[in-house]
Amino acid sequence: MRCRQCQAELNESSYCPVCGCDVSLQKRVYLISDMYYNQGLEKAQIRDLSGAVDLLVRSLKFNKRNIQARNLLGLVYFEMGEAVAALSEWVISDNMQTKDNIAADFIAQLQSNANKLDTINQSIRKYNEALETCRAGHTDTAVIQLKKVLQQNPKLIKGYHLLALIYMNNDEYKKARRVLKKASRIDHTNSTTLRFLKEIDEQLGTGSRSSSQNILSSFGGRDKDAYTQGSPEIFVSDNDVVIQPPAFRETSVVATLINLCFGLLVGAAVVWFLVVPATRKDINENANAKIVEYSDTMASQSTQIAKLKEQIKESENTVASANEQIDAAKQEVDSYENLLKAYSAYTDGDYSSVLKVIENIDERGLSVDARILYDSIYAKVSDSLFSDYKSKGIQAYVDKDYESAAENLQKAMDIKDTDYNVLECLALAYREIGKNSQARGVFAQIVKTFPNSRRAVNAQAFIDIIDRETGTDTAGNTGNGDTQEPQTGEDTTDTQEPQTGEDTTEPQTAGETQPEEEGGLGNADEVLGNTR
């Protein structure tokens, strides 16, 4: 024993020989701890494991460095099937005393036997699963899992208690009693086991009864008249009670045959009512055991399959996300490569190559610096790009390829939306392919861009035609309008644009300036000639 103040070795004196501290209280506390340890050891020797645990825990409360008490507590826990609690106590003991400590041997034995340690871990995991299953209300599955747990770890008292509790909840008190008897063989005085057994006795009405019975109270000698003929005679000889069997009397042959037949019938009845049911019971128990084993295997496999499906789903999501990131990164790389090609062609003065490459650049994925470079190049070549789209679109319109014309002219309009030729041909191309809503929007752009002009008047006439065709007037009301459709000077199928046949010149009022007269919707060939 060492002093708590200076860690010096103590002697029989009540004071520390080094620091002079009063250690009488310390010695008394250590003495109480040793007393509880001795009592716990006695309890453990008679398999009163619950009482041993209680006493050893008290011993450690008084002296947490009582290595012997801690090691014994770990052994008791291990004997009760709680291997995790046992390992915890042994690890603490080994850390407190690293030399000459048997706890290190216990830990090494468990670690050397990997199969046993794995079995313990599986039994604990399955017990926890059975507990969660029982809480969820699936008691049948919990019973199967607990039986499997008790096969792997037959000393797990908590497993017996949970299984007995399930049986009691299902009113199967006899099964619960058998389970609790097994638990009582491990821990004779476990309070939970005794409480459950008492409750079962109360439910079944089989409380403790006195089995003592007096056979003979007194005998005053032989009294043959008190007994019927053929019954045993009871008399007292000195201080002993003598029971004399009746005298044997020979019977007839008929009686012998009757007795023999009766004995055969009794034997057959015994075989039929005892042996056969026992054999059937063994067969049924074996079959039930196989069914339980297969059910447990199927349940485990179903759980594994569900986990594997979740892993596959997660992997598929990960792969899909990775593919999306790869596509985005590839698109970004292509945009940077096209930007470099465009810049190289721009510095060489090859604007035609710049126009081909810059169309494939997604400016949204560029960085700030790269976007500045893109904007500078685009600003330089936008006019050329606009002219290229414009010429391609008008040529496609002349060739009656209205889909291509609408696509190229829309791109030209996105660059510059104030060019009348582009707007006019784009609106007419949308009309030809049946996209009246887009055509109306382009005609509205003409009216907005060229107000108070003949171009605006002609565009408004087309807007009125479209509204009449779709069943709405310019005010948003349904019905037929009275707006006259612009007259064409030539057949419109020969790429001739509609010409208004009536004078749409707005009246001039005093004080107003007449807007400059501009041409109507001209011929596409004329438009194409203007761009060449």
Image (spheres, grey):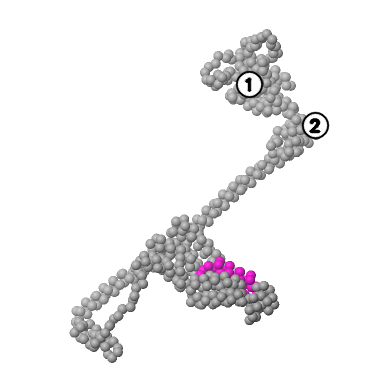
Q: Nearer the viewer, residue 26 or 359?
A: 26
Q: Quick check: 220 left or right of 294?
A: left
Q: Which residue is mark 2?
A: 349
Query: Any magenta on residue 83?
Result: yes
Q: Position of residue 222 (x, y in %)?
A: 22, 87
Q: Residue at x 76, y 33 (%)?
A: 376
Q: Position of residue 443 (x, y in %)?
A: 63, 21
The correct choice, above or below, for 373 with respect to 225 in the image is above
Q: Residues within 10 Å of mark 2 (few under 14, many from 20)?
A: few
Q: For residue 443, which numbered disc appears in the image? A: 1
Quadrant assignment for the N terminus: bottom right
Mark yes or no: residue 115 visible: no
Q: Quadrant of residue 381?
A: top right
Query: Any magenta on residue 257?
Result: no
Q: Residue at x 57, y 19 (%)?
A: 474
The correct choice, above or below, for 375 with respect to 27 in the image is above
Quadrant assignment for the C terminus: top right
Q: Quadrant of residue 351?
A: top right
- Which region shows up in magenta? 80-104
The correct choice, above or below, for 452 with respect to 277 in the image is above
The correct choice, above or below, for 246 with respect to 184 in the image is below
